[in-house]
Amino acid sequence: MTESELFQRYRETGDKELRNLIAEKYLHIAAILAKKFVGRGVEYDDLYQVASLALVKGIDRFDERKGLKFSTFITPTITGEIKNYFRDRSHLIHLPRKVSELRTAVLNATEELTRELGKKPTAAEIAAKLGVSEEEVLCSAEAGWVVSLDRPSEDGDMNYYDVISDGNDVFEKIDTHDAVASALEGLSETEKKLVAYRFGEELSQAETARRMGVSQMYISRMERKILEKLRERLKKSMAE
């Protein structure tokens, strides 16, 4: 039975067993999209549950008569649900008092040092002024990013949850392994190791940090840089 016939049968009968069969057939899409959002303060299991529920809702809304492939329809549908989950969650998360106080101190120290130095201070300079470690300064900044997804991004008009990968992400348009392999070739050995741990073995950031002998914060920062680097290389590859 073709995809179109499968959905036509479900549309006509409303058979829940048929719906479950369709869901099982496309659950891998929910899994892939959930994994894309791991590392942003939410456990994979929670993201997978959100994605799976969005998949089931999408099956009920899909109309095969419009000539659209279900995978094309459901990808932005699931991604939108996950983004909404992050948006709703961002209003519910509260920083621990110690972290919140340090973050306020870091922001104040940053303003003072900017006036004194005539430039944005480094994390080391802020740490020296506050008498804390550089790692604590970076952690406070990272914590602020996690709970402030709805504040304006550096691009101006967009919010941070708006720039999280969506259904039109460049990675969704790469149909061959060659382009990805080529982009990965340009990474350093350390970056390749991180990619292998995080996306090959699907380890958490904490476990990856333990294996590589660095801090989780270091892994988080490096991961973002790697993903941005790969995204740009894949865009360039597609344009050629």
Image (spheres, rainbow, N blue to C red):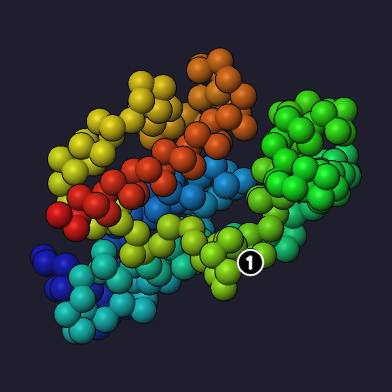
Which percent across, then down, holds residue 121? 72, 41
Q: Residue furthest left?
A: 1
Report the number of numbered marks: 1
Front position in the image: 174 or 19: 174
Q: Residue 165: in sight, yes or no? A: yes
Drawn side of residue 212 relative to residue 65, left or right:
right
Left-right relation of 161 to 130 = left
Looking at the image, residue 90 sits to the left or right of residue 189; the answer is: right
Residue pictured at 38% horizontal, 35% vertical: 199
* x 59%, y 62%: residue: 153
Dot 1: what SS?
A: loop
Q: Quadrant of residue 186?
A: top left
Q: Please name the residue shown 34% across and 71% down the image.
A: 59
Q: Relative to 99, does residue 232 appear above or below in the rendering?
A: below
Residue 110 in view of the camera? no
Quadrant of image for the C terminus: bottom left
Tell me where residue 200 appears, x and y as whole percent: 35, 30
Q: Position of residue 163 (x, y in %)?
A: 49, 61
Quadrant placement of the N terminus: bottom left
Which of these two is toward me, 31 or 57?
A: 31
Q: Position of residue 119 (x, y in %)?
A: 71, 46
Relative depth, front residue between 54 and 148 = 148
Q: Which residue is mark 1?
A: 152
For disc 1, the neighbor class at 10 Å (few under 14, some 14 to 19, many from 20) is some
The kind of residue on which mark 1 rests is Pro
| Nearer to the camera, 202 or 156 | 156
Residue, x 66% and y 50% (percent of image)?
146
Q: Is residue 195 above or below residue 172?
A: above
Q: Would you say 160 lies left or right of 69 here?
A: right
